[in-house]
Image (spheres, rainbow, N blue to C red):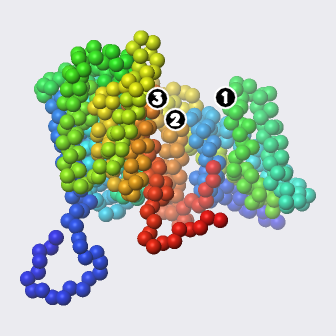
Amino acid sequence: MNNTKGYWRLIKNGIFAENPIFRVALSLCPAVAVTSGVKNGFLMGIAVLFVQTMVNVTVSIVRKFIHPKVRIPAYMFIIATWVTVSDLSLAAFAWDIYKQMGLYIKLIVAFAIILSRAELFASKNKVTPSFFDGLGMGIGFLLALIIISFFRELLGKGSLWGFQFTEAKPLLIMVLPTGGFFAVGILMGLFNWIDIKFFGGGGASGGGH
Amino acid sequence: MAAVKKEHELIVSVSPHVKSEETVSRIMWTVSLSLLPAFVMGVYFFGPRALFVTALCVVSAVLSEYLFQKGLKRKITINDGSAFLTGLLLGMNLPTSLWSFNPFMIHVPIIGSFIAVVITKQLFGGIGFNIFNPALIGRAFLLITWPRAMTIWTEPTAAFVALDAKTTATPLGILKEEGVGKLMEVFGDQLNLYTQLLVGYRAGSLGETSAIALIIGAAFLLYKRYITWHIPVSFLSTAAALAWVFGGKDLGTGKMLLFAGDPVVHLLSGGILLGAFFMATDYVTCPSVRKGQIVFGIGCGALTMLIRLKGGYPEGVMFAILLMNCFAPLIDRSMKSRVFGAVKEQKK
C-alpha cells in the first residue's frame, strides 16, 4: 500500500487544516495558561504530543473491545494512564522542570483535544493512521503553543527561553492571562485570514475550552 | 433635512415618515463639545502637556481608524466623530505626566488609542457593535501594561506656561493609603476640600478633575436629551449611599465605622462624574431598556465603591463600567418589556 503519502497528509492535517488551537479552537485553556514563556509552552507541547500519540494508539488497539456505551469513561482511563506515565517520568528525570509544570501536566487529562481525537479518529481507524493522527495533532498543538508563547514572552518579558534581551518590558499585559487571550485571538484571526486569502478556506470552525 | 419642495406631489414612501435631524455624527460631535469645558479646565490646571497628550490620543485614534478601514478596504467613517470622541475621552482619562516625565512615554497614548479604536471597536464590527466602551478598554490596557507611568499624577498649577511639574497623590489615593485625616491636612478644612474638588484643583486624570465643568457638560447633554437621567442618577446615588454607609473609618483604630463616610468626597473625586455622565451612558454599551439602565447604574456604582473601598486600586470607575458592559446584553434581554397583548408563556 502506498500509505506514506496518507500518513504525511494526516500529520499535515493536524498542523494546518485542523490545528487544535487555531482552527478547531479546542484546548484554549492551556494555550492561555502555560504560554507565558517559550520554555513552558514547548514542554507543555511535548507532553501533549506524547500523551496524544500514545492515547490514539491505545484507543485504536482496544477500539473493538470497548462497548460503545462506556467508551468515554474508557477513553478517560486511557488518557489518565498516559498522563500519569508522563507525569511520573517528568518527576523522575526532570525534577526542576516538573516543579514549574507539574500542575499543568496533570491537567492534560482534561484537555478537550485529546478526548476529541480519541473519539473522532482513533476509535474508528487502525493503529498506524491513529498514530500519525496523534503525532500530527500533537505537533500542531506544540507549534501553536510555541508561536503564542514566542510573542507573549518577547513582548511581555523582553526575553526568549528565559534569556533576557532587554530590561524593558514592552507590553507587560502580554504575560498576564489577558494578554494570552489577546495573543490567541489575534493569531487565530491572522491564520484565518491567511487561510481565507491564500487557500480559499472558510476560516476556523467549532469551539471548546 | 432636505428643503421642502415647492411643487407638491403626492409622495408615497415607506416608513419611517417622521425623521429626526439627529445623526450619529451629530451626536458624537455634540458629546465632544460638551466635554470641552472639562477639557479646558484640565488644560488650565495641568498646562500644555494636557493638550499634547489629548491631541496625541485624538490624532492617533482617528488615524488608526482611517488606516484600519483603508487597509481592509472598508468605508471610511472617521467623519462621524466617534473615533474623535474615543480619542478625546481616552486622553481625558490619562495623567499628564505621560508627556512630561519621560519622553519615551509618548507612545503610551498612541498604543491606547490603537487598542481602543482597532481592537475594541473595529475588530468587533465597527461603530455600534463593540461590547465594551472603547476608551475605557484603551485605558485599562494602558493601566495594566504600564502601571507605574499611568499612576504618576501631576500637581495642578493653574499657570498655563509652567514647565515644571510636581508629582503628588490623587485625593482618592490619599484616602486609600492614609485616610481622611491626611486628606484634611492637605486641603485645609472641609469647605476648602469641597471647593477645590468642585473646581478641580487636584491631581488626577487630566479631564476628570473639574467637577463643575463636567456637570455643565452633562447638563447640556441632559437638556439636549442625548443622555437620560437613569444611568447617572442610579450610578451616583448608589455610589454615594455606599460611600456614606461603608466609607467611614475610625481615625484611631482604622476600623470601619458604619454610616460615617463622606459621600461628597467620593462623588467629586476620581473619575466618577466623567464615568457616570459620559462613559456609562454610551449608547452602544449600556442597556437600552430604561429599567435595565437603572440596574446598570446601580451595578456600576456598587462595583465602583467595592473597588474603591476594598480593592487594590484607589479608583474603580473604569473597571466597574467595563464589568457592567459585559452584563448589558443580559440586562436588556431579561428586562425586555412585554409586548402589549402578548400572552405570557406558561411555566410547566
Amino acid type at image mark 2: Leu
According to the picture, the residue beneath numbered tag 1 turns out to be A100
> B285 or A58: nearer the eye?
B285
Residue tagged 2: A176
Q: How many marks?
A: 3
The mark lying in front, picked from 2 and 3, is 3
Measured as percent of width and height from the top left, residue A51 is found at 76, 44
Residue B102, numbered circle: none
Q: Residue at x 52, y 44 (%)?
A: A181
* Residue at figure coordinates x 64%, y 38% from the top left: A42
A1 is higher (above) or lower (below) than B264:
below
Q: Secondary structure at mark 1?
A: helix
Q: Residue at x 51, y 26 (%)?
A: A164
**Which label lies toward us, 1 or 2?**
2
Structural distance between the alpha carbons of marks 1 and 3: 29 Å
- Chain designation of label 1: A
Chain under label 3?
Answer: B
Residue at image coords 54%, 32%: A160
**Marks 1 and 3 in Cβ contact (< 8 Å):** no
Q: Where is residue B186? Give x, y as percent.
A: 26, 16
Give the vertical position of A63 relative to B192 (above or below).
below
Q: As shown in the figure, which amino acid type bears the numbered disc 3?
A: Gly
